Amino acid sequence: MAKRILIIDDEKSIRHTLKEILEYENYEIDEAENGLEALKMLESAEYDAALCDIKMPEMDGLELLEKAKELDHSPQFIMISAHGTIETAVEATKKGAYDFIQKPPDLNRLLVTIKNALDKSNLIQETKTLRKKVSSSMQIVGQSTALDEIKETIQKVAPTEARVLITGANGTGKELVANALHKLSGRSKNPLIEVNCAAIPSELIESELFGHEKGSFTSAVKQRIGKFEQADKGTLFLDEIGDMSLSAQAKVLRALQENKITRVGGEKEIKVNVRILAATNKDLKKEIAENRFREDLYHRLSVIVIKVPALKDRTDDIPLLVDKFLVDIADSHGTSPKSMTDEAIVLLQKGEWTGNIRELRNVVERLVIMSDQEITAMHVKKYADIQ
């Protein structure tokens, strides 16, 4: 699909020359002879880039740029002027212009600038799309009593600095609770850093959490910043903390007590300002009794405990989860969402779901792939083995 560019200039000859050049490069071109006309066009249509003169009657280019930046979809602005100065270029950049080119523009530079501006526009759009997908995938879906209680707890706890321990079986959505706590906190503009303690070998967990200095061990060929430092002023989510070694637990406890860490192989103490969220699928009290988890660390982590229920204990949420998964899967496959009959959903509600929400999503994806446009009870019996 051709990229759309709006040319804004009060000189007809310049508009036509630029249009001729850019249409030859396969761009789709519209013209506006002043800022007011251009603003109306920007409000009613989406453009990828705009070539905008600065000196124009009624509304100049810099004023138009400011107003355009307030729109939901603002194109990349390339300002052009025969009266350009360094001050004008700086002002245009501060107001959000991608670049500034003097008249008459050098053709090669103009085309390269447009290409780079469009690349930036594509990157911004891709980032927005990715954020929407991530945001959608991290939604807590459901209206069961158990889930409503969790949502209420999140609303109360998120704005505080309290440490939270999130418990529940694998696949129940503990990471969604952690994400919601971070998003609703005063730290939401800073990073949420996740560490899966079960996925990192015990001999590397301390380096992962606290970083290391160059030469501190054989493979430490350069300095590394650990997760605690990366999460400074944000939130650190220690997933599957029940799998953390006792040695690392001792260092985490010290970091929580003193708000300081020391990199592996280092001597300097580094101050950190981190909120800790932790999650586990283990019974930590049992782990404490068997000397596999520190009781003092447990009490530090569990100011608030949120227990995420298994899917079999919230089957009322399955219809809503299925609807969401049908949309998400269609988006990922680039197709329109399939539908599922009421009888098929009732059958899904009878499943054991030992893998919880993660298993349900996998089953729904299998049904989407293997069924026709409508997923029926017959499909569920055949492909999900639920009778």
Image: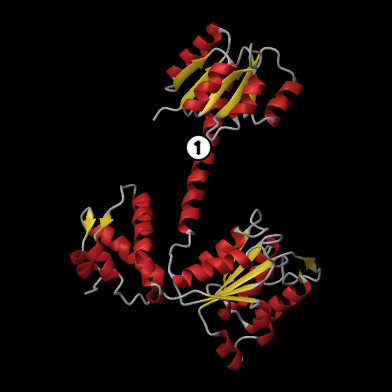
**Which color scheme did the rendering employ for the protein?**
secondary structure
Q: Quarter of the image holding residue 185?
A: bottom right
Left or right, 298 with respect to 342, comes to right
Identify the residue at the far left of this view: 378
Residue 106: image location, x then y, percent: 60, 16
- Nearer to us in this view, 97 or 71: 71
Residue shown at 33% from the left, 77% from the top: 352
Residue shown at 35% from the left, 55% from the top: 329
Residue 174 shows in the view: no
- Nearer to us in this view, 150 or 262: 150
Amino acid, disc 1:
Asn
Callout 1: SS: helix
Residue shown at 21% from the left, 65% from the top: 377
Left or right, 145 with respect to 205, comes to left
Identify the residue at the far front of this view: 145
The residue tagged 1 is: 122
- Nearer to us in this view, 107 or 175: 175
Residue 40: image location, x then y, percent: 52, 22
